[in-house]
Each structure stands twice: as C-alpha cells, then as structure tokens.
Image (spheres, rainbow, N blue to C red):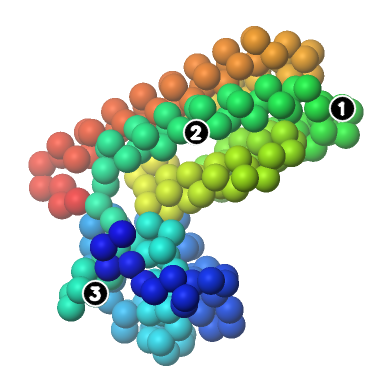
Amino acid sequence: MPGSPKRSSLRRHPQGHTQKAYQGIRRMLFHNELPPGQKIAYRDLAERLNMSQTPVIQALKWLEFQQLVRHEPHRGYYTAPISIKEVQEIYDLREVIELDLLSKTIRRVDPGKLETLQSALEEHAAAAREVYLYERLLKDMEFHLALARLAGCTVHYQTLRNLFDLLYLKYGGTLLFSTSLSRADADHQALFKKIAAQESSAARQVLRKHIRRVKAHVVKGLKQMVAAPGRDI
C-alpha cells in the first residue's frame, strides 16, 4: 500500500517503549481521542504518553501496516477518514467468517465450551447494564471472539480479530453511538440457546440476522454523521 513502512521493520510485534506507545495509541483510537481524518501530531502524542517521539513514530508505522492509520509522504500520519464502503465490507466478511466458524463450533460443542461461551455472554449482559459504553462495545466483541475461538480455526479467528480492530479502532467512537447494544444482548442470548440445543440451522439464522441488523444500524448512523452540517470527517 502507498506509503507503507518497510516490511523488514515490521517482522515482529513492537517491543519495549514502542509497544507502550502502540498500546497507548490503540486506546486513544478506541476511545475516539484521535478522531477520524485528523493529522496526528507526534509531539502531542509523545507528551500524552510521556515518552520521546521516536517510539511514537515506530508505533505509528506498525499501525499503518495494520491499516489503522495512513501516512502521507512529507506530511506525516493521519487517522483514516470514515469509509462507509469499508464498514459495509467488514460486516459482509464478518458474516461469512462467523457463520462458517459457528457451524464448526456447534459440531465441537461440549459442556466446557458452553461454560466458556456462557461466561462471555454473562460478561456482556453485565456490561450492558453499566453506563460505560466502551466497556459494552468491548464485551460485545469478546463474546463474538469467544464463539469463534471455540471452532478451533486459528487463521479464521485471527482474521476476525483483525476485522474487529478495523471496526473498533478506526470507527470505535462513532460506532458506540450508532449501535443498539441492548438488542445485541437479546440476540446473543437467543444465539446461545440455539447453540446449547445444537440447532445449527436456527443458530446460523440468528447470527446472520444479528450481524445484518447491526450492519444496517451502524451504516445508517454513519451516513447521518457524514451528512451532518459542519461535520468535518
């Protein structure tokens, strides 16, 4: 991709101060402290993270490699602008991957796996009753990833994690206010019941409707945001 860092510098996960900067910037993206489409000031980030600019720049290179920020030659790094097309594509791919993994999970389900999934379900339900909106979004993701992990397909699972990164780090702050998390809790409950009963076809139907409903809700919210007067994104 244009402006991407040299692959040789990205062969391993960032370490030390760069790792600290990387995690700090990810948190800022998730909490919408770095809004979409804005220039990233190295000095400001370094001050906020209480470190020099060098690990911040190295962390931004890693985030660019993951397509979470973009680089413009001679101008610096920017947070990615909102792309409704990209969000639609992410949800479409999520549907394909999650439905495929769901079938495998149901074939492998046992009491231990059901207990794991129920714990993730209960944590999401508990978060849905709290006022911390970011925690709700995080627990929603963790439920879906717990369900996917039980299928035992490492590459599919990692791909799904990457899709959640794109959604929640590039659009997290905006998704929060356009997603019906209370409805998501009811969908998760219904899905768990179908999985426990090993009703594969019914479970797939619940999950498909859930993902498509959330997609429609999110896309509608993003379109309203983009069209809002004076909105600079």
- Residue at 37 percent of width and 34 percent of height: 89
Among the 4 quarters of the image, the one containing residue 84: top left
Q: Is residue 87 visible?
A: yes
Q: Earlier in the sequence, mark 3 or mark 2?
A: 3
Q: Are marks 2 and 1 in contact (CB under 8 Å)?
A: no
Looking at this view, name the residue that lies furthest to the bottom. 52
Count of picture labels:
3
- Residue at 10 percent of width and 47 percent of height: 230
Q: Is residue 143 visible?
A: no
Report which residue position mark 3 lands on.
76
Where does residue 51 sit, x and y in percent of width and height? 46, 87
Looking at this view, name the residue that lies furthest to the left. 229
Q: Nearer the viewer, residue 101 or 78?
A: 101
Where does residue 47 sit, x and y in percent of width and height? 39, 84
For the N terminus, which image quadrant? bottom left
Tell me the CA gap for discs 3 and 2. 31 Å
Where does residue 197 sit, x and y in percent of width and height? 79, 13
Q: Are marks 3 and 1 in contact (CB under 8 Å)?
A: no
Label disc, if present, on residue 94 of the rendered structure: 2
Considering the numbered disc 3 on the image, is that residue within a helix, a strand or a loop? strand
Considering the numbered disc 1 on the image, is that residue within a helix, a strand or a loop? loop
Amino acid carrying label 3: it is Gly
Report which residue position mark 1 lands on.
110
Looking at this view, name the residue that lies furthest to the front. 8
Is residue 209 found left or right of 200 in the rendered image?
left
Q: Nearer the viewer, residue 201 or 226?
A: 201
Q: Earlier in the sequence, mark 2 or mark 1?
A: 2
Is residue 78 found left or right of 67 in the rendered image?
left
Q: Nearer the viewer, residue 213 or 92?
A: 92
